[in-house]
Image (tube, helix red, strand yellow):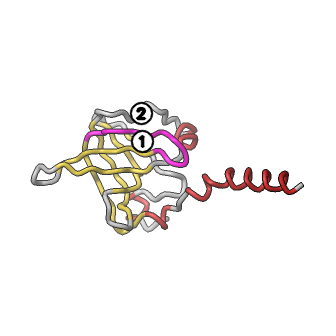
């Protein structure tokens, strides 16, 4: 009986790990610090609990700045019609979002605009986008 209860407890703990790893927007990002970055995608990680994509941009002096952007969950993005191949390494994109509270070059990638003018909303359901904050919405 103890072995069975131990197995059940271990299974529940493993099942809860994705929820423990998940973070809320307000815990991670600062909605008073919007960012707009234009650069080249270097890597895309399409996995739960969030999609991550990495962008190299240049500052005013030509120095490369490495950014990491968090998007919504893969399933959430696919329900919006945003598939795995929409953002690919080598693409030049514009990303809008909000900087991480720790001041690092991490941000939520709320909106991605491609060179041809197409735009996709890549944030999670609870994330903010720059226009919402400017209009006083949350």
Q: Give the percent coordinates (x, y) of residue 70.
A: 43, 51
Asked if residue 17 lies left or right of residue 83, the reply is right
Q: Nearer the viewer, residue 10 or 30?
A: 10
Q: Give the percent coordinates (x, y) of residue 18.
A: 60, 52
Q: Is residue 71 above or below residue 127?
A: above
Q: Is residue 119 above or below residue 85?
A: below
Give the mark toward the camera: 2 or 1: 2
Q: Give the percent coordinates (x, y) of residue 10.
A: 73, 53
Question: Residue lying farthest top?
Answer: 85
Residue underneath mark 2: 86
Residue underneath mark 1: 120
Q: Is residue 40 above or below residue 4?
A: above
> Callout 2: helix, strand or loop?
loop
User: Separation of disc 2 and disc 1 at Cα?
Assistant: 9 Å
Q: Which residues are magenta?
A: 40-51
Q: Give the percent coordinates (x, y) of residue 57.
A: 22, 47
Query: What residue lies at 51% left-to-right and 51% top-to-bottom?
Result: 124
Query: What residue lies at 41% left-to-right and 55% top-to-bottom?
Result: 108
């Amino acid at each position: 009986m103890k072995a069975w209860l131990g197995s059940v407890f271990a299974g529940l703990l493993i099942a809860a790990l994705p929820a423990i790893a998940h973070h809320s927007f307000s815990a991670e990002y600062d909605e008073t610090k919007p960012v707009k970055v234009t650069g080249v995608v270097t890597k895309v990680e399409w996995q739960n609990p969030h999609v991550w994509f990495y962008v190299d941009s240049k500052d005013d002096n030509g120095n490369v700045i490495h950014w990491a952007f968090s998007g919504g969950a893969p399933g959430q993005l696919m329900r919006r019609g945003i598939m795995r191949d929409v953002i690919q390494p080598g693409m030049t994109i514009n990303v809008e979002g909000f900087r991480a509270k720790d001041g690092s070059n991490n941000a939520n990638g709320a909106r991605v605009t491609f060179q041809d003018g197409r735009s996709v909303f890549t944030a999670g359901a609870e994330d903010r986008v720059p226009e919402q904050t400017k209009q006083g919405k949350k």
